[in-house]
Amino acid sequence: MESMATESKNSAGELLKQGRLRQRLSIAECAKRTHIATRFIEALEEERWSLLPSESHRLGFLRLYSRFLGVSVDDVLSLYSQKSAPAPAAKTEAPVEKQKPPEPTERRISDRRQVGWSPSSIPQLIGMAILLLVFSWVIYHTVRPRFFDQNQMPWARRRSPAQPRLVVPRTTLRIHQVQLKAHADSWLRVTAKNELLFEGILPAGSAKEWSGAGPFQLKIGNVHAVTLFWNNQPVDVAAGATGNTNQIRIPPQ
């Protein structure tokens, strides 16, 4: 009971450090077995939170490192939140803006009637459009036999036959769909055409999905904790893995 009370008074970094020392593990060995960089483990134990990339990285590394050392995740996150919670900001009263009085409805309606055409002019516009189409049709069929008859044009007989056009088939763009599900916390990095799509800890029970022309480059930190699908077909993520880490390209070369 006294040891538990002592641990509860420590900080999150001290709890992690004590858990590592109890198991007589070095920081380098922990980094190798958890796939967390050595500098990040040192930052966790020394509570130098600014060295971690983002808040999601902090929480993910704290969960993963605590479970690896056998330390209570709830205690570590509780101590972390107590020190990292921002101070409440002072309340400031926002200046009250004067609202403009709404314009009278009758004035807005009158403005609409003055601009453009009115609904009563629609039948006149339709009639004028029909007359214009009829007049154009009569002129076309009257003038065409005189000036556009191909048999009466001498240059039409000397024209060389039209060459057939070469139609280049369009290349269809294949869209690839990549879906990844995590059964346990695992580090993941996904890029496509040198663009970073995701990097960080994928919590247990969560899923990520990307689609595009590819190719997609995936680096998985724990291949036994994730399931990968390519166009709804399962992919063996453990094939060619080095330890628990593997790099996969979709589509393969």
Image (tube, rainbow, N blue to C red):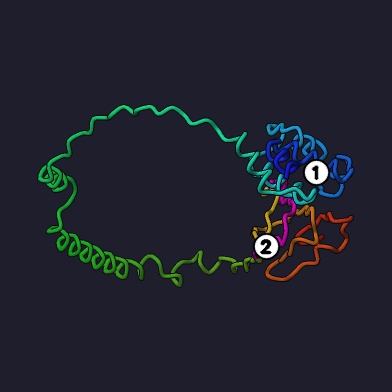
Q: Nearer the viewer, residue 134 or 31?
A: 31
Label 1 is placed on what type of residue?
Answer: Gly
Residue at 22% x, 66% y is 130
- In the displayed structure image, the side of residue 242 where residue 234 appears, left or right: left
Residue designated by label 2: 179
Residue for badge 1: 19
Q: Is residue 27 visible?
A: yes
Q: Is residue 171 visible?
A: no
- In this image, 132 relative to 1: left or right? left
Asked which secondary structure carries label 1, the reply is helix
Label 2 crowd (10 A; few <14 / some 14-19 / many >=20): some
Whole-percent x, y for residue 10 in the image: 71, 36
Q: Is residue 186 magenta?
A: yes
Of the residues tagged 2 and 1, which is closer to the observer?
1
- x, y (%) of residue 212? 65, 58
Q: Which residues are magenta?
A: 170-196
Label 1 neighbourhood size at 10 Å, few (<14), some (14-19), many (20+)? some
Q: Give percent across and percent down for residue 179.
A: 67, 62
How far apart are labels 2 and 1 at the CA level? 36 Å
Secondary element under disc 2, as helix, strand or loop, is strand
Identify the image quadrant of residue 80: top right
